[in-house]
Structures are given as structure tokens and as C-alpha cells.
Image (cartoon, grey):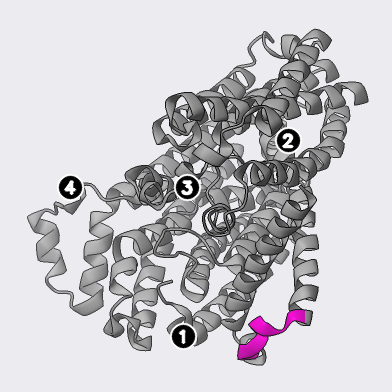
Amino acid sequence: MIKTFKTIFHLKTVMQVNVFLYYLKRLWVIGKMIPDNAYGMDSAKKVLTVIIAVLMQVVEFVGKGLYLAVMIGLPFLFMGKNQILTPAERFLWMVHILFFTNCILGSLQDSQVFSVTRQKITCIKYMQMDAGRYVQATLLSKYVPFFVYYLPFLILAARMAGGSILQGVGLWLLLVSFRMMGEALQVYLYDKKGFVLSRNMGFAWGVIILSLTAAYLPFFLNMPHTVAPVIIHPVSVLIAVILGAVSFYYIMWGYKAYAEKLKRSIELKYLFSNAMKQAKQSSFAEVEMKEKDLKTSREEVAKFQRLKGYAYMNAIFFARHRRQLVKPIYFRLAITAIILVGGIFLYISDKNTAVKLSENLGVLLPSFVFIMYCMSVGDKSCRAMFYNCDISLLRYGYYRKPGTILQNFKIRLIRISLYNLIVGVALSAVAVIFCILCGTSIFSLDLLAFSVSIMLLAVLFTVHHLFLYYVFQPYSTGLDIKNPFFTVINNVMYFICFMCLKIEAGGTGFTMAVLAFTICYIAVALVLVYRLAPRYFRIK
């Protein structure tokens, strides 16, 4: 077991180091300093292996806290229920949400036994490693830190929600037990029926929709507690622990057919089957073209006739992607209308608070930073451009010419910025209407700064996604995201925007900081795109 674990760990870290070195060499300035023989420097790679291994564990640990903050803290923050619920009620809602999102959704959506990785294929298929020992080693290496990192955050979350330390431990035991039951269920079904449950896209999406609905709909409707008191009851926890222990024994030592059947789950003919293609393309499913998208009216065709070259190509592209890119704008405009209705309701129910708020709109800006990030269509646009255009055209030399790359970038920047600015203008209009309703001057510096900040945020998130797409081009021909720098920068931006929600009072200082940050980020990103995109915008 220990030897198997060491082999798997060494193989995994070596692969990660090689991928890191590959993309590090592609970075500007730093890349030139990395020699071509870096892959063969054993001593340096050992140091790098340790650093990456430690960083990954830190990320895993912090990720557990962020997960709980987003899945539990964010709904409470938006609903403002921390002020109107008793501690006991808050804790029961926490149990309710965690049960459906983690115990049910997490257990059925993910399977370490049937995960398909290069590491697994290498170990079992090519190195002929014993499949049973491989499963045992990977289960322990995956779930021991997974559960250990969750424990302190679950105890802390339970205490903050109004529960006890013992109840936090009970939640942790439920999480451990249901994960083991989920793994055992998938192994049993594969053994008896010959299919992997988590790879069935219909089942996967069904579980996502049903679990999230069950988790959050009762919460937002403030329905009576029916599930949580039963789940967290000591008898229920004890039953779950017993079933979890039996499941753990089954997947670790009880099931004897890993050597015979696990290899079939990673055969190449399966990996390239429609099921796996659907799994890989799941993040691109919402931008996939349909036959009706290809139809354009005569008026549109006539309008495009005056355009030439890549301007004509991009005009057709965006015309055919109205369903993917324009319809979401209508949805976002509906959200702004709801925000306006909320402002009107606030004015009717509490006029003094509404007037004070209209006189200091800057206090709302921290929340609107995150709202504008979520409302941006930049990420979806980049996926649509890659999946339906660039993945094919980047194979041709003429499309990779610097002039062509920058020309397309400029056209796309303007178009996607317009999409996001529509939402920004709508939110600014809502702010103006709210000020008029409250009798506040619409020519105030506060309203001007708020509106300008919203507009710049719309442009910022457009530039952000296009910058990452053109400089790091993260997507591979297999539709995977393989560039670690893309993931890190994207997550950092998300984290910054999310942390803005924690700022209770924005004010003038925060507004000025937002304006300065957006202007600097946009300027730096555009310079980097024009300098680096011609070299790094390639198919992988």
C-alpha cells in the first residue's frame, strides 16, 4: 500500500510539474529565463514538486472554507436572514443546505473510483499496477485530506450559525458517511449493471437541478423545517455512520473485482465514446450551435454586405449567437427591473432609509462589483468563440498572423463590451430613477461616480475574460482547461469580487479605489494582449 501510494504521488506531482514548466516557459519575460533542459533538472524539479504539493494542499484547505462561504454564507447574505432568524433556525437551514448540496449532490456527482485521469490510465493500463491497491491508495490520498480540511470549517460554520461543536462534528460525520455511500453505490451499480452513474449526463444534470432546488427553494420561501431536524438527530447520524463504515469496507476491501472490471472503465474506446465527449463538452453545451441559429434574415444579410474580411465574419458569428449571448442580456435586464421594484418597495415601506440610500449610493457599490461580475457575458462569449470558431480556424497559419489576431480581438472587445454595457446602462438608469423617486438630485457627484463605476466594471470584466482568453488561451482540443495560470488569475478575480460583498460600507473611498483599479487593470490588460496575444493565442 505504501509503495503504491508513493508511486502514485510521485507520478502525479511529476505530471503537475511538467505541465507547470510547460506553461511557465510560455510566459513573457519569465519564460525566456527557463532553459530547455529544465525538464531534466532533477534537483530543481524535486524542490518544485514539494512547493507545488504544499501549494495544492493550501488551496484544497482554503477551498473548503470558500465552498462553505459561497454555498451557505452567500444565500444568508443576500436574504439578510442572519438578522431575522434565531440561532437554532440558522443552524437548521445550514444543515438543510449542506445535506442536499454536499451529502446528496456531492456524493452522486463525483466518484474517485471512476474518475478518469492521465495518472489512472498510466498506472493501471500502462504500468500494470494492481487495480485494487490503486483504488485503495487513491481513495485514502483523496479523502483523508478532504475530510480533515473540512472538519475545522464545519465546526466553525456550525458555531457561527448557532450550533454547537458537537453538532459541527455530527455534520462532518454525515459528510464522510454519505461520500462513502456514494462511492459504494457507484461501484455496486457498475459491477451489476456495467455503467458508471456519475458519467450519465442526464442523471448528472437531474441530480444538480433537483438537489439545488431542494436545498435553496425552501430556504428562500422560508418553509417550515422538515428535513434538517431529522438529519442532524443523533440516531440519524449514527445510522449514517454505520452505513458509511460498511460502504467504506466494501469499496476498500470487500469488492474483489477491481482488477477485472476497473480497466474496462478506462478503455480508450470508452474514453472517446459519445458519453465522454458529452462530459468533456458539458461546459460548452450552453454555447453549442443549433440549426435554427444558422438562419439569418434577408435584412441582416443585406446589412452585412457592406462589411468585409474579419468584420464580416464576426458580424455573422454574433448574429448566429443571439440565443447564447443576447438572450442572457434580456435575463439580466429582467434582474435590473427586479432591483428597481425592490427600490420602489423600499421607498414605500421605509422612506427615510430609501432617501438616505439615494444620497449615498456608494455604499451599494461593493455588492454591485460582485453583481457585475456575475452578469458579465465575457466568459460565455469566449467559450462560444473557441468552440464554434477559433478551435477550427486556429489550425490555419493565416488566422494566427499577428494582424489577424489583434483585428479579431478589437472587433470582439467592442461587441462584447456593448453587451455588458447594456446591463451597466440599465443599472445606472435604475439608480437615476431611484434618486428621482426619493427626491435626490440626479446631478450629484455620488450618482455620477456610481454610474461611471458600473460602466467601467462592465468594460473591466469584458477585458478580463478576453485578456485571459487571448494571452493564456486555456482551452485544448479536448475542450479541457489545462492552463494553471488562467485558473489562478480567474479565481483570484472571482475571490476579489466575492470579498467585496464583505465590505459593509463602501463610500467615496471605495468608489475611488474601484475606479483606479478598473482603469489600471484595463490599461495593463490591453497592453499585454497587444504585446503577447500574437505569440500565445494558439490551439493546444
Instruction: Say what amino acid the circle numbered 4 marks.
Output: Glu
Q: State which mark lies toward you, 1 or 2.
A: 1
Q: Who comes first in sequence, dot 4 or dot 2?
A: 2
Residue 77 part of the magenta segment: no
* Mark 3 vs mark 1, CA separation in Å: 36 Å
Q: Residue at x 79, y 81 (%)?
A: 43
Magenta stretch: give its range.
35-42
Residues at circles 4 and 1 in contact by the CB criterion of under 8 Å: no
How far across and down, in percent of the image, does residue 289 sit? 26, 50
Labelled disc at residue 535? 1
- Residue that carries the numbered disc 3 in the rendered image: 266
How many other residues sit within 10 Å of disc 3, few (<14), some (14-19) or many (≥20)? some
Q: Helix, strand or loop at disc 1?
A: helix
Q: Residue at x 71, y 65 (%)?
A: 512
- Residue that carries the numbered disc 4 in the rendered image: 291
Count of numbered labels shown in the rendering: 4
How many other residues sit within 10 Å of disc 1, few (<14), some (14-19) or many (≥20)? some
Position of residue 72 relative to residue 35, above or below, is above
Position of residue 310 relative to residue 146, above or below, is below
Q: Who comes first in sequence, dot 3 or dot 2?
A: 2
How far across and down, in percent of the image, does residue 407 sit? 34, 80
Instruction: Say what amino acid the circle numbered 1 marks.
Output: Arg
Q: Is residue 104 left or right of residue 204?
A: right
Q: Residue at x 30, y 80 (%)?
A: 399
Q: Helix, strand or loop at disc 3?
A: helix
